[in-house]
Amino acid sequence: MTARIRRFLDESRPATPCLVIDLDVVRESYLAFTRLLPQAAVYYAVKANPAPEIVSLLVRLGSSFDCASIYEIRDCLAAGAPARRLSFGNTIKKAADIEAAHRLGVDLFAFDSRGELRKLAAAAPGARVYCRIAMTGEGADWPLGRKFGCEVDMARDLMLEAGELGLEPHGISFHIGSQQRDVRQWDVAFGQTAMLFTALDEAGVKLGMVNVGGGFPARTRKDGPGAEAHMEALVAAARGHFGNRMPNLIVEPGRALVGDAGLVQSEVVLISRKGYRDEERWVYLDIGKFGGLIETMDEAIQYRITTERDGAECGPVVLAGPTCDEADVLYQHSNYRLPLTLEVGDRVAIESAGAYTASYSSVNFNGLPPLATYCI
Ligand SMILES: *Cc1c(COP(=O)(O)O)cnc(C)c1O
């Protein structure tokens, strides 16, 4: 919890649950990327947290944006981002949305299949396109699996076809998996990308850009290398595979720009035991999977959880949300422990929760409103 967030919570006592974002931390994280990766352009992955205050701040700092939908594109334009600084990075787009984006001036599009390439050729003629190659997601707490990307030999053929269809074959992208804990994945990704560059060069297509996606972690309960260690590994991998033929780099951090900047303040609604002999307490919070903590699915993202009674003796707990849904359990296999003195009404903080929370929270499940966000 930053000093600014603590002061805001003490002075304003907002109703819970809520997300508080310290914009100073967003700024510092953005500047860390520009400092440690001076050779890369930063495209903020808007889906991590589309709060207008965050987008406006990043526009002022000179960031570019990776947009997942025509709605995010419109929001970024409304916040003052020039269309030339937007990438339509989703590989799954409606033709009408491609056309609308192109009409608005967007000129950079992702694809990973022939079907999408055909749509781009028809709806955004002449646009710059990049092909996403598949990664395993190994080492990532929130892998992106087989949903995105294609194999390298297919990417080669599609990039050749892009040129034939009147598009500009611009570059290659990948994403090594979100909340990645294995910095060696950068080397795997750049190795495949460099091979692809060579194969395309031999076929007469010269590419100029590698989009390395995200994957840089926020701080969670699991130890792992921080975002800066990832950036160092990324630079080493890029140098190792491209040497002095270094292409332009695009980096698309989402989680690492906003995760550590945010804290979810919640309240204990109920503490119970399921049997007289149970040592384990069930602690029900006023936020759960549907309130924005969906990344606790399979207990994948393990948030650091703090209370005002930390320091007291702790006992095992199951942590659950408040809704009438069996799936709304946060952690029951990951050995969470909380103070034995914890009481109903106590405030509980979910740390480093600025990414993929507010944007995931449901609209009206059980009548609950979406997660309120305060940007300070
Ligand atoms: C979600 C996403 C990102 C952001 O990933 P993080 O792991 O949150 O940094 C970047 N690029 C693309 C294409 C994405 O879909």
Image (cartoon, helix red, strand yellow):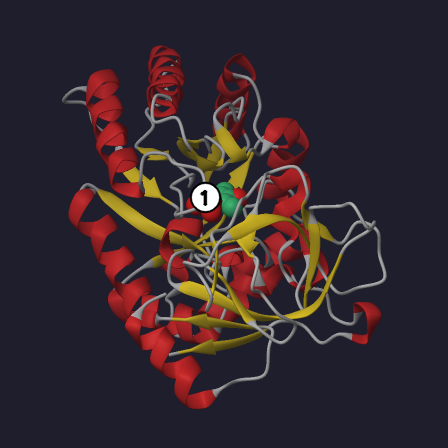
User: Disc 1, ligand 1: is the CB inside 8 Å?
Assistant: no
Q: Is residue 246 above or below residue 17?
A: above
Residue 259 x %, y %: 43, 56
What quarter of the picture does the C terminus occupy?
bottom left
Q: Is residue 266 left or right of residue 289?
A: left
Taking the view exactly as shown, the residue that stands out farthest to the bottom is: 11
Picture residue at 23% right of the left edge, 20% below the top:
242
Amino acid tagged 1: Arg
Above or below: residue 253 compared with residue 72: above
Quadrant of the drawing holding the N terminus = bottom left
Mark 1 nearby-residue class (10 Å; few <14, some 14–19, many ≥20):
few
Image x and y of residue 253, in percent: 39, 48
Placement of 152 over or under 338, stated as above or below: above
Q: Which residue is mark 1?
A: 221
Q: Is residue 127 visible?
A: no
The picture quadrant where one finds residue 190 is top left
Residue 181, how many percent across, how many down? 41, 31
